[in-house]
């Protein structure tokens, strides 16, 4: 005899935050899960996000020669963010069964791949940020206690890349670049 199981009731919950709160949450989650960032740097990055000063953030995986083999990148399109808000979508509600621990599916998948690669290749991590266009970088560096960094040098190898726009947050995308060794 065939049997089936039917679920007669479902229980879902959602979390509603402003778009800016979700952006900040995704950045903080990425930094905490993929780097050993110190609290003062994390606080400064949060401040910069809340003021819409940062448009891009990367977490690099560096080998023992200080050459990059992996990059997790988060990009924020502040013009698209403003457009979404002007359309009336100031807040976003996310189902807790979809975004586990408030982490966007797209970010979660690439974080796992980045962390696995970093562990397998015995890499250290370093965080870098880029300001949004048309800002006074010297003034912001002074306020945040930052300085201009030397460019990252990549190790030799074939590059594999993947970029995902966060479905519920079209102003934000996450990408992963790794060397195929």
Image: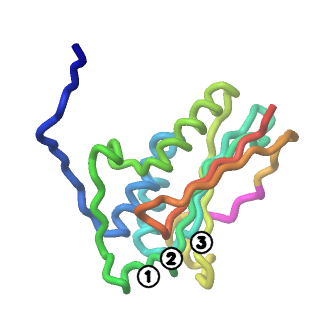
Residue occupied by mark 2: 78
Secondary structure at numbered mark 2: helix
Q: Residue furthest right?
A: 156
Asked whether disc 1 touches disc 2, contact meaning CB atoms under 8 Å apart, the reply is yes
Q: Give the CA separation, mark 3 to mark 1.
A: 17 Å
Q: Could you say where residue 26 lies in the image, as x and y percent from the top left?
A: 43, 54
Q: Give the CA separation, mark 1 to mark 2.
A: 6 Å
- Residue sitting nearer the eye, 128 or 110: 110
Name which residue lies at 39% across and 48% down. 103
The quadrant of the picture occupied by the C terminus is top right
Image: magenta residue range: 146-151
In the image, is residue 52 above or below residue 124?
below
Q: Could you say where residue 58 lies in the image, as x and y percent from the top left?
A: 61, 54
Crowding near the residue tagged with mark 2, few <14, some 14–19, many ≥20 C-alpha atoms within 10 Å: some
Q: Give the CA separation, mark 2 to mark 3.
A: 11 Å
In the image, is residue 127 above or below residue 169?
above
Residue occupied by mark 3: 131
The quadrant of the picture occupied by the N terminus is top left
Give whichever of discs 2 and 3 has the lower sequence position.
2
Q: Tell me where residue 8 sits by quadrant.
A: top left
- Identify the disc placed on residue 82: 1
Name which residue lies at 51% across and 81% down. 79
């Amino acid at each position: 005899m065939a049997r089936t199981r039917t679920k007669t009731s479902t229980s879902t919950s959602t979390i509603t935050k402003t778009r800016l709160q979700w952006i900040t949450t995704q950045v903080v989650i990425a930094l905490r899960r993929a780097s050993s960032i110190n609290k003062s740097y994390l606080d400064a990055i949060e401040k910069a996000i809340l003021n819409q000063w940062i448009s891009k953030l990367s977490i690099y995986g560096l080998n023992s020669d200080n050459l990059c083999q992996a990059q997790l990148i988060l990009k924020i399109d502040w013009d698209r963010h403003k457009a979404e808000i002007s359309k009336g979508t100031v807040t976003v509600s996310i189902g807790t069964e979809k975004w586990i621990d408030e982490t966007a599916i797209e970010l979660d998948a690439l974080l796992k791949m980045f962390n696995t690669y970093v562990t397998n290749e015995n890499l250290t991590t370093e965080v870098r940020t880029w300001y949004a266009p048309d800002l006074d970088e010297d003034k912001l560096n002074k306020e945040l206690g930052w300085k201009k960094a030397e460019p990252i040098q990549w190790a030799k190898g074939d590059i594999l890349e993947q970029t995902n726009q966060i479905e519920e947050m079209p102003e934000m995308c996450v990408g992963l670049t790794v060397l195929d060794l």
